[in-house]
Image (spheres, helix red, strand yellow):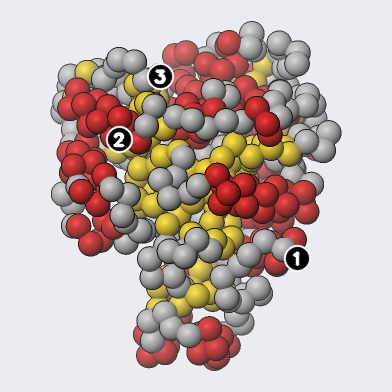
Amino acid sequence: MSPRPFKKVLIANRGEIALRVIRACHELGIQTVAVYSKADENSLHVKLADEAVCIGPAPSSQSYLSIPKIVTAADITGADAIHPGYGFLSENAEFARTCEECGIRFIGPTSENIQAMGDKTRARAIAKKAGVPLLPGTVEAVPDLESAIEEANTIGYPVILKAAAGGGGRGIYVVRSEDELSANYERMVQEAKSAFGNGAMYVEKFLEQPRHVEIQVMCDNHGNRVHLGERDCTVQRRHQKLIEESPSPVVDPDLRKKMGDCALKLCKSVHYRNAGTVEFLLDTDGSFYFMEMNTRIQVEHPVTEMVTGIDLIKEQIHVAAGSQISFKQSDVKIKTHAIECRVNAEDSKTFAPSPGKINGLHLPGGFGVRVDSFVYDQYFVQPHYNSMIGKLIVHAPSRQEAITKMRQALDEFVIGGIRTNIDFHKEVFDHPRFQSAEYDTHFLEEIR
């Protein structure tokens, strides 16, 4: 691999992921460009990048979601590549296509990859054709309420209605009867239109006690495709992941291979390139079903890095520059355990956002403890963006040791001046069901 695949990379993002990419670039000898809104003028990614360009006011629609402003920033600074991070424009096919047309390398999948997997109904059709297991449901979006009722009656209640263009845990509705479907269908469609600009919905069977398990993949332009094992993302609130771990406590080597093989089969079918995550629902009997593919780096990628020893961001950069993947499937060995907590600026009881100035900060440390964060003492947490202000990751020889290490690290983690969900995480890690791994995606609803 070339030690310096690009001369200058612009990071089209903010917060901890912008810092993560900046640090990886600097280790590779690559100059970096930060973009920022006026609200983020004092953010750490602005301070640590080699150059920084203000791209607009606080609202994301006028800054971090503005393709013309970001591409212009890359042009005027001479950046030859853009890393989109996660969220914002990371899964926007138009953004990737614009970069391609402007001669700027997009550090991620192709625009065709993003378009193919971004629409959930299209992704389901692709998965079905590739022989990847699917839950019973519609491959195409349902055109109206009558069709939705017909499909739901065929599948059997409960069913789940999903926005075809949804993502990030939004646009998902559980329906347990025909009356409930009739009463709420139009509202679901309108909410999907408002959130995603597309009201198309599809119907699939709802599993009562599933786990959410995803497979990390990496693919290059030379036909190499490798998976890096699974992450268990079952601890969720309203379909938003809060705690992730690798390996999953309920996945054995045989199941890992089956899920990994299916993920790579899907990647091969669309000629996928760069990092991605194939998400599955895992039933109590060991059956698993394709949910969706995230065509970007994930928030929870550090747990995979910790158990494999592979730097996924550097790998993304090298693959985008045309290099082959630096490791083979046989090199991926998972013998330890890692857990990540998303630390949010929100009330532990109500989950209401808690922006404001941080007054006092102590980060946990020690062997096997990693903190990915962009905040510092006296930093003002903005109300304009996602409430996540950091990620606490621990790494240990076993799951029980990782839980013990995480519990201690949470005790050491002090953020003054604002409310955080640190106490919530302590509650989860103290719970016997979490410690014994006997829970599903409804765990938080049941203990709160």
User: Which residue is located at x 57 percent, y 30 percent?
Assistant: 333
**Kind of element beneath mark 3:** helix
Between residues 407 and 164, which one lies in front from this camera angle?
A: 407
User: Which residue is located at x 59 percent, y 60 percent?
Assistant: 290
Q: Nearer the viewer, mark 1 or mark 3?
A: 1
Give the CA separation, mark 1 to mark 2: 40 Å
Between residues 139 and 285, which one lies in front from this camera angle?
A: 285
Res 364 seen here:
yes
Mark 1 or mark 3: which comes first in sequence? 3
**Which numbered dot is residue 400?**
2
Q: Position of residue 137 (x, y in %)?
A: 58, 76
User: Which residue is located at x 44 percent, y 14 percent?
Assistant: 47
Residue, disc 1: 129
Q: Which amino acid, by three-letter code, is at mark 2?
A: Gln
Residue, disc 3: 44
User: Which residue is located at x 67 percent, y 16 percent?
Assistant: 8
Query: Mark 3, residues whose alpha carbon is within 10 Å: few (<14), some, or many (≥20)?
Result: some
Quadrant housing the C terminus: bottom left
Q: Nearer the viewer, mark 1 or mark 2?
A: 2
Between residues 384 and 363, which one lies in front from this camera angle?
A: 363
Give the CA separation, mark 1 to mark 3: 45 Å
Q: Position of residue 165 (x, y in %)?
A: 57, 61
**Kind of element beneath mark 2:** helix
The picture quadrant where one finds residue 400 is top left
Q: Which amino acid, by three-letter code, is at mark 1?
A: Lys
